[in-house]
Image (tube, helix red, strand yellow):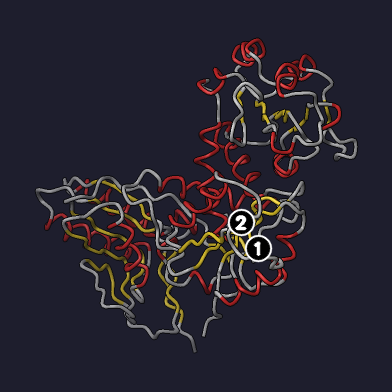
Amino acid sequence: MTKETIDTALDRVAASIADRYQDSSPVVAGIHTRGVIVADRLRAKLAALGCGVRSGTLDISLYRDDLDNLGTMPSLKNSDLPAVDGVDVILVDDVLFTGRTIRAAIDGVTDYGRPRKIELAVLVDRGNRELPIQADYVGETFETERTDYVAVHLNETDGEEGVFLLRKS
Amino acid sequence: MTDQPRRKDLLDIQSLSVDEVNGILDAAVPFKDLFKRSVKKVPTLKGKQVLTLFYEPSTRTKSSFEIAAKRLSADVTNFSVSTSSVVKGESVLDTIDTLQAMRTDYVIIRHQMSGVPEMIARHTDASVINAGDGYHAHPTQALLDAYTVRETFGEIAGRRILIVGDIKHSRVARSTSRILKMLGADVRVFGPGTLVPDDRPEWLQAFANWDAAFAWKPDAIYLLRVQRERQDDQFFPSVQEYHKFFGITAQRFARVRDEGIYIMHPGPVNRGVELVDAVMDYDRSLINQQVENGIATRMAVLYWLKPQSTPLPG
């Protein structure tokens, strides 16, 4: 994906969210690291569409299921969520792959309270799920093998824009 | 901030790099943030077994570790030393064999002899955390002190910290002065002549009296606890004498307040010995913050360590 197709994809996602949330203002919560940036952009687009949302960020490191296998300590960022009791929460990430990050994020959100509903918006869905999880809003779908690598580069973190699919030959 | 490599044990401060220390302090920030949530617990160490093994009395450090481990969802067992087979003559190594058979993932140990935690670390797959050994080290106290200084002043480098009391027998003084120095603070000491060792590191200068110490303009004064239970060997005549010469008396407190100097203490406080009552209500007393930060930094340490008992992938 290029700078332009990323932007168009996010326009589409924002339009669908705005369509569904005309009267309530959901919490749009980005998952660290790049999900936070995607969420920031979505919120800006939603604001332009006249859809008011609240913001949040989530670090899921403490909810991972693979800490035993890690030789390094994942650095932690602050999670910052408003009160979520009885509220709609839209989780935002850059890539949806195995679904394990989202599983961890759902657990994380529910430790802050009991939302009315949790939805998921992603820039790219690359398939290969290992858990029964699906996105409600998808910017772009990639057909990939499990061993392929999807690299999302965003200006804020990587100094360039683009989503790249690296095939393992 | 790049991800820090994990280690098996935390035995002292000097074996840590500046990056490792900063990595632990950084990780403690979001842990402290968890305390504001309605659910203060995270599932990070679910199913892990933490064992506390205290050969020396301690209420605070032990509870702090216990709370830290429980907030990470670990299971905590206190191997109660006075009532266990230790009094029946079981050696430390025999105890370790028992712990190994119990498949403990983390052992938190305090022992009156320096070096015991290190010996245990060599003989077990579990991660060993030194919670104080003899006069040697108390690394988690040092980390929570450094965290508190950083939180209060924004940065540790360039800050002036005065440590007052029994420098010679204090593992707190040893570990805390080292970590603060490592992170760029200027640390000096003051205490009874018999209790300020001559063989201290060259950078650790000592003051001869309070006037000289105040003239140095410290940002914080760190009062060490007078270990009344260790007063068998008389290093100073009485606690009253100690208060008069080395404590924060009402008169010295007036000066501390006028100059806006922060007060730290590892707890528990002997009121009327290290400090007068009024200091406890002083808005620049960091003593309660140290307690809260102790839980957050100990959570960060447990998160960072990697027991060898955990199975390898695949």
Chain ID for label 1? B
Give the camera-side residue of B47 and B97: B97
Amino acid on which disc 1 is placed: Val
Q: Is residue A116 left or right of residue B313?
A: left
Q: Badge 1: how crowded within 10 Å, few (<14), some, or many (20+)?
A: some
Residue B86 image label: 1
Q: What element does badge 2 sit on?
A: loop
Residue B182 seen in the figure? no
Residue type marked 2 = Ser
- Disc 2 sits on a residue from what chain? B
Q: Which mark is residue B82?
A: 2
Mark carried by residue B233 = none
Q: Residue most toward the left? A: A23
Residue B130 found in image quarter: bottom right
Percent of width and height locating residue B153: 58, 31
The residues tagged by marks 2 and 1 sit, at their Cα atoms, a distance apart of 7 Å
Residue found farthest to the front: B88
